[in-house]
Amino acid sequence: MRQIDFDYLCRLANLELSKEEKTKLEPQLKKIVEWINKLEELRIDTDEEKAFGIDDSLPLRKDIPENSLPLKEILSMFPEKNGNFLKVPKVIEGK
């Protein structure tokens, strides 16, 4: 199990902590290190497909390009437009 020199870590990070801050943060850091050590115990599959959870048993459709609808038809179905642009409600708040 890895041990962390808290003072050394603070120097590396250029942190100037008070004794109270060190007393509060050191146990938190130890818990994080313990958690990381547990992760190292996990058996990680080197088979990339298994590592990313890709299920080969699921059938995939062929990616066949198809013609899209003509622009005029799309524009005729849309309630608000500005020339060849579709107007949609604003979804981002701010300026």
Image (spheres, rainbow, N blue to C red):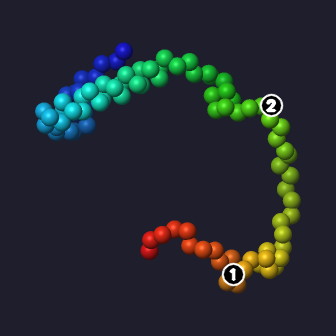
Residue that carries the numbered disc 2 in the rendered image: 57
Label 2 secondary element: loop
Question: Depth check: 1 or 20 in front?
Answer: 20
- Residue at 67% over, 83% down: 82
- Residue at 24% over, 28% down: 26
Q: Mark 1 packing: few (<14 Cα in 10 Å), some, or many (20+)?
A: few
Q: Position of residue 56 (x, y in %)?
A: 77, 31
Q: Which mark is residue 80?
A: 1
- Residue at 47% over, 23% down: 39
What whole-number distance in Å separates the C-alpha atoms at marks 2 and 1? Answer: 44 Å
Q: Quadrant of the C terminus?
A: bottom left
Figure check: 17 above or below 62:
above
Q: Amino acid at mark 2?
A: Ser
Q: Position of residue 36 (x, y in %)?
A: 41, 25
The first of marks 2 and 1 along the sequence is 2
Outermost residue to the top: 1
- In the image: residue 14, left or right of residue 37: left
Outermost residue to the left: 19
Q: Position of residue 57 (x, y in %)?
A: 80, 31
Question: Depth check: 10 or 95 in front?
Answer: 95
| Residue 93 in view (yes/no) | yes
Q: Position of residue 8 (x, y in %)?
A: 22, 27
Figure check: 58 above or below 95:
above
Q: Amino acid at mark 1?
A: Glu
Q: Which mark is residue 69?
A: none
